[in-house]
Amino acid sequence: MPTLTLGDFELSIFSDGTYPLDGGAFFGVIPKVMWSRKVTADEKNYVQAGLNSLLIRTGSKTVLVETGMGNKLSERMIKFYGQPAKLLTSLAAEGIAPDDIDIVINTHLHFDHCGWNTVHDNSGKIVPTFPRAKYYAPEGEWQYAQNPSERDSISYISENYNPLVESGQMTLLKGGEEIVPGISVKTFPGHTAHMQAVIIKGCHPEEPAFGAHPHTACYISDLIPTSAHIDIAWGMGFDLYPLQTIENKRQYYAKSIPEKWLTVFTHGADVPWAYVEKDELGKMVARHASGS
Ligand SMILES: [Zn+2]
């Protein structure tokens, strides 16, 4: 399990497993001759996508960013995606029980990002997987999810969030809020209109901002889903607003590169996080982060 220290905070990646995605859809308009140098596709043109959750221990709170695909997929969706459902086992292997999670943050509400928000109990009722946790998700995303377009309605499973909003356990965010000291959200439209990245600043106030160790990390979610998508123009075919993806990647890099942020990739099957840098020729490169 990849782990590293970010100032006072400890960051770890926990995976819900991997699932197959069509390589063409994963890389949008990028030709296969180009993307196949970075990832391998099987005979059906599927590539393996990861389902990385980020666990942050702040010292006082345990925060889980994203909850993978979960275990409530329909038969039809299992045919497409399988249902790895490994997150709770991965957490348990490190001694983390559902009761230990204080806060859950969803960047958006696609089924592969909030699937373990809820589970069926023995009687078939939907209950929160993390009973003590306060859940957070973008308000605009939740509103959109009530009536999504035909293009992406398959991505929304209301059992993952509506029961939590109804019970008051999920708080809806406008974007820009600090959820606990050092952990805030910022809206980066492109993949969806309201997706929010999670920015983690783990430094002591008296420490210099750019020391030998990273002080800021960003769970950038589907704005940059894997380290193979770091080029400004390499968006996913799933993005609803591809030109906004490009503009927001540019804005993200304008801060993350000079400030040496650690970027966390939701769907990186092999590389869950890296430092994204620009080389002398202006090409984006992902520099290995210790712990991965
Ligand atoms: Zn996704």
Image: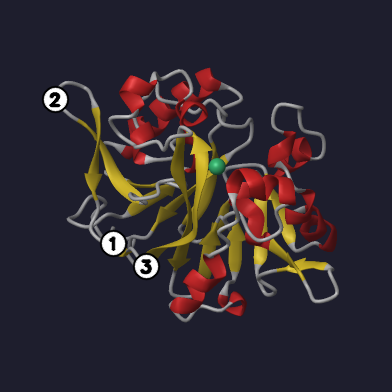
At label 1, the amino acid type is Glu
Q: Residue furthest front?
A: 43
Check mark 1 vs ligand 1: CB closer than 8 Å? yes or no.
no
Q: Left or right: where does residue 199 sit relative to residue 273?
A: right
Residue 291: name its quadrant.
Answer: bottom left
Q: Which residue is drawn at 40% across and 33% down?
A: 252
User: Circles 3 and 2: CB distance less than 8 Å?
Assistant: no
In the picture of the structure, the residue carrying the numbered disc 3 is: 10
Q: Residue at x 34, y 50 (%)?
A: 270
Residue 45: mark in rendering: none
Q: Position of residue 25 (x, y in %)?
A: 52, 28
Q: Could you give the CA–CA distance between mark 2 and mark 1, rounded to whole angstroms?
A: 33 Å
- Closer to the chain start, of discs 3 and 2, is 3
Q: In which quarter of the image is the C terminus?
A: bottom left
Say if 214 sits above or below 61 in the image: above
Q: Where is residue 33 in the image (x, y as percent from the top left)?
A: 32, 21
Label 3 element class: strand
Q: Left or right: where does residue 27 sit relative to residue 190?
A: left
Judged from the image, the quadrant occupied by ligand 1 is top right
Q: Which of marks 1 and 3 is in front?
A: 3
In the picture of the structure, the residue carrying the numbered disc 1 is: 206
Q: Position of residue 152 (x, y in %)?
A: 69, 32
- Closer to the chain start, of discs 1 and 3, is 3
Residue 280: mark in rendering: 2
